[in-house]
Image (cartoon, helix red, strand yellow):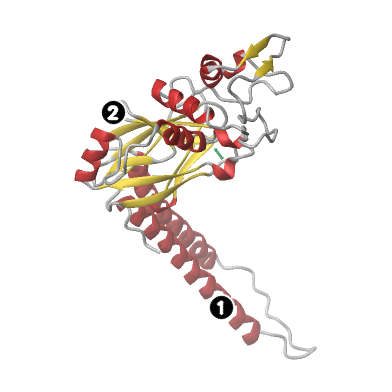
Amino acid sequence: MISDATEVAARVDLVQIFIFLMMAFWFIACNAVLVYFMLRYRRKGPDDEVSDIKGSHMLEVVWTVIPIILVFIIFYVGANVWKDLRTPPEDAYEISVTAQKWSWSFKYDHGAIKGGDLFVPQGVPVKLNMISNDVIHSFFVPEFRVKEDVVPSMYTNVWFQAEHAGVYNIFCTEYCGKDHSHMLGKVHVLDPDTWEHWVNTGLMPGEKQLTPVEAGEALFVERGCKGCHSIDGTKLVGPSVLDLMGREEILEGGERVTVDDNYIMDSIKYPDRQIVAGYPKGQMPSFDGQLTNEDISNIITYLKTISSE
Ligand code: CUA
């Protein structure tokens, strides 16, 4: 079970195994003594009188002091790892993480904002500064043994140093609404050459540049739009995007609008400014600052292709 995905992960596992073995030892030892006493000192007949024991200070001290020492050992071993797990190195590479229903987005030093998957360099300490735009989420990478709540109005952080290039799972592990179970992602740990390539191009080696429609579709899925806006006309939390472009919508308050590029852009950035009548307010998170202008343009291009004709 010992993970070597990060150095801390292996130590977290050691603490767990240590505590487990210690408890297993005492559980077996105590129960063995219990069974032995039951058999050895059981009443043999109606006249078998039990001697009256008044207590033993010696025994009291022994079974109080030994557990206290054990608890302090457990505390010491755990606190030692906890301290390192919670103290990011000064020179860590920092990435801003934003959680919102129901996706992750990651903003990097070089300005890139990417949704869905996280890309990190191998062998370099990485610190994630995390905040939520709406409710409480929790960032969890099981292989790294890091998990931390991501809350509104307060930054929290985790750090890790991934030792091997590879792909690991990200889970949201705080129940955050309807699509909580779909709030997933991957951590891609990239070797130095691949990392450099990715930083410069935004692409993995061999990955080709997506067309605007493909990029828009990918964003529509990664950013969780799909969870609330169907592409087949089904009414979900929000209006379907089937035949969206050119459609006439009646807004809350009675105003009529014809959907065009600007209406869609505004809806993505400031969703509560133009609620379609019959739909709840405050459901859609703002993607202002979460998506680049190019991202929004790609999404609009994709939405134009969702047509029943
Ligand atoms: Cu976000 Cu569960």
Q: Quadrant of the N terminus?
A: bottom left
> Would you call the spot at circle 1 few (<14 residues within 10 Å), some (14-19), or many (20 or more)?
few
Seen from the viewer's position, the closer of residues 227 and 6 is 227
As drawn, the label of residue 33 is 1
Ligand 1: image quarter: top right
Q: Quadrant of the C terminus?
A: top right
Image mark count: 2
Q: Residue at x 71, y 14 (%)?
A: 252
Seen from the viewer's position, the closer of residues 282 and 18 is 282
Q: Position of residue 119 (x, y in %)?
A: 33, 41
Q: Are marks 1 and 2 in contact (CB under 8 Å)?
A: no
Q: Position of residue 280 (x, y in %)?
A: 70, 23
Of the residues shown, which amino acid type is indicated by label 1? Answer: Val
Quadrant in the picture for residue 111: top left
Is residue 290 among the parts visible in the rendering? no
SS at mark 2 in the image: loop
Of the residues shown, which amino acid type is indicated by label 2? Answer: Asp
Question: Which residue is label 2 attached to?
Answer: 109
Q: Residue at x 39, y 51 (%)?
A: 168
Q: Residue at x 47, y 71 (%)?
A: 25
> Would you call the spot at circle 2 few (<14 residues within 10 Å), some (14-19), or many (20 or more)?
few
Q: Position of residue 28 (x, y in %)?
A: 53, 74
Q: CA distance from mark 1 to mark 2?
A: 61 Å
Residue lying at the far bottom of the rendered structure: 45
Mark found first going from the N terminus, 1 or 2: 1
